[in-house]
Each structure stands twice: as structure tokens, then as C-alpha cells.
Image (cartoon, grey):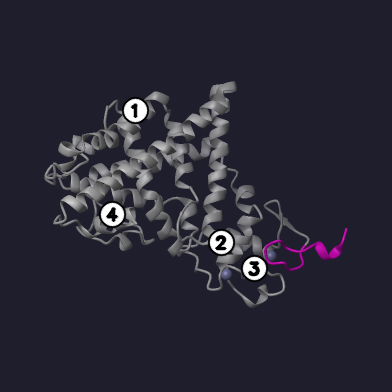
Amino acid sequence: MDENQKTCHICYKPSRLFNYGVPCCNACKMFFRRVKTFRTPLRECENNEICYKNADEIFYYDCKSCRFQQCIRAGMIENQEKIRFFDIIPILHQLEIEKRNILENYEAPFKNISFEEVTDTEPIQFKPKSLDTRFNSYDYAFMTHTSTFDYLKKLDFVKMMTSSDSKAFLKSSYLNCAIFSTAMHCYSHKMGFITFPEGIDIFPTDIDIIPIHFPRLELGIKCRMIGKLSELRITQEEFLLLNIIFICNPDVPNMSETGLLLLNCHQKMYSSLLLKYCQMTYQHNAPSRFNDLLSICHVISKTRQDTSNVALIFQIYKPGIKWRDMFKGAIDFLLK
Ligand SMILES: [Zn+2]
Ligand SMILES: [Zn+2]
């Protein structure tokens, strides 16, 4: 064997070691481990993400983002994490319960916040809702947004992103996640259509333009997802895995290559877990069950499209509404 080939696949320095199934020196192994425990997000690459792409040049750079990208490319995340069904399901379940608890029993520490600020990496410190507080649909919409952002920020792989990647990711994925999770909650409580907690209508009742002039749009948003979930009789485990698979969708605008690779490799890991679950549960019907489950993403997209149509209708027919800043930003992003 050629001695020259024995180099670390991350930093290209000479090394005969293997770590996480990859030719990788100890320094790079330690670096990879540390990324998972960083309290502050990785700094963005200032060099078009080429720092570790040319073996002759890398010693000029000290770019954590590119070094981490090399680790992902080499397959270190897949080799290290070995996500197992019985470990991950309770974690995802717990996060889902926490999110729902925040939505029902807490309030945000601010009445107003911009879409930019709410998608910053800092966690939101919710406070228990006082007994005499009554939420209307605007308040619950606000809480649905903020509790979903909070949930997404708690995911392990999101903590490994740079702050601008995390922002791009949060903006692009929170709505689908909120749609799926709200529909699943209502479906598992045997409700025929989507509402906010306490049966509060998801459309503001002071704007009657949707039910009066666009009843099919209203029906689609409230019932289509629940219809699909009941048709498939989706289980809680399937929902948890499918939700995280959709969340890891790497189709995020303005994201770095490192961020996209991170999403991509997590999506692959969760997908193979769902496939294994289907094989255990449905035996030879596993492939068709797996495809049926994935087809839910089209129904989520349709509901998202309908939601942006509602936003558009509000803008055209009710231009005077004083939306809170976060909704203004969210609507602009949706209609972009
Ligand atoms: Zn190395
Ligand atoms: Zn770089």
C-alpha cells in the first residue's frame, strides 16, 4: 500500500488512524466531537466554503464550518450517531409534548417581536399563562409560531448550524412543521377539523372574508390534512419520524453547503429508520406503506399553498389589518 495515501480525510495531515469509520486524525476526531457540544453556533465560512477543498491550501485557514463539512462528507455523522428507533422515538415524543404544553399553558415573554428576531438562535423563555388570560386566534397563531420555532431550535442538528443557516432553516421549515403537528394533534383527539386549543378557530373571527367568499379554501386548510391522516390511520411513531424527515428537507433557500449536507444526512438516517419501522410492522407491505406515508408531504405542501393564498387574500381585501411584526415578516416570507 502506498504510504502517501495514509492521510486524514478531513485535514489531509498524515495519519494512520481511523475514527468513526473514516481515516481521520485524533485532532479532527476531537474537533468533530466538540462541534456537538458548542454552546455558540459555528462561525460562517468567509471563503465560499472552499477552505478544506484543496489539500495544499488548507493550512492557511482555520475555518470550523468547512472542517465540519469535511466530517459530514466523510460520513462521520452517520457512523457516529447510529440513531436507533427505541432511543429516538422517546426524545421526539418528549419534544412534541413540550411544544404542545407551551402552546396550551404558556405565553411568550414579549407581545411583539419581528420575524428576524424570533428566528435568532437564542431560546425563547416562555412564562406560565396566568389563569385570567384568554387567547384569541391571533394569540394562538402567535404561540403556534413561537412554540414551533422553540421546538426546532432544540433539535440536535440545528444546534450544529451556523446562525445564518439556522435562521434560513427555521424560516423555511416552521410552517410545514406547524401544519403537520397541529393536524396530528387534532386527528389523534378524533376531531374532524383543525382548531387551536380550546376550540378557538384558526381563522380570526373578526375577518369573515374567508368563510363567506372562499369556503373551499377554508375547508381545505381545516380538513384536508386530517382526512389524509385518518385515511392512512397514521400511528404516533410514524408521525414522529415522518415529521422529522420532512423537517430535514434540504430544499432551503440561502443555506450553506455545510448546512444542506447536515440536513441531507439526517434526512437519510431518519428515512431508513422509518423504512425499518415499516418492515417490522407491515412486513411485505412495507414499501407501499412507506410510500403512502411519504405522500403526506404533498398534502402538507397543498395546505401551505392554501395558507399563503389566505395571506394574499387578507393583503388584498383587508390591507388595513395591523398585523404583529412577526406575522408581517412571516407573510412576506411566505409570499416571496
Ligand atoms: Zn485531521
Ligand atoms: Zn471555510
Q: Residues within 10 Å of mark 4 (few under 14, many from 20)?
A: some
Distance (Cα) linking label 3 and label 1: 49 Å
The foreground one among 113 and 110 is 113
Give the amino acid type for the residue marked by disc 4 in the picture. Answer: Ile
The answer to if 178 sits in the magenta stretch is no
Position of 280 with respect to 217 (left or right) is right
Give the mark nearest the N terminus, 1 or 4: 1
Q: Which residue is mark 1?
A: 227
Q: Label 3 sits on what residue type?
A: Tyr
Q: Which residue is mark 2?
A: 34
Q: Position of residue 266 (x, y in %)?
A: 54, 47
Lower position in the chain sequence, tag 3 or tag 1: 3
For label 4, the residue is: 331
Q: CA distance from mark 2 to mark 4?
A: 38 Å
Which of the two labelled residues, at mark 2 and mark 4, occupies the earlier sequence position? Answer: 2
Please give the label number shown on residue 52: 3
Q: Residues within 10 Å of mark 2 (few under 14, many from 20)?
A: few
Residue 272 vertical position relative to residue 64 in the rendered view, above or below: above
Q: Which residues are magenta?
A: 1-15
x then y, percent, for residue 244: 46, 43
Say above or below: 63 vs 300: below
Coordinates of residue 39 in the picture (x, y in percent):
46, 62
Ligand 2 - quadrant of the structure image: bottom right
**Label 2 vs label 4, nearer the camera:** 4
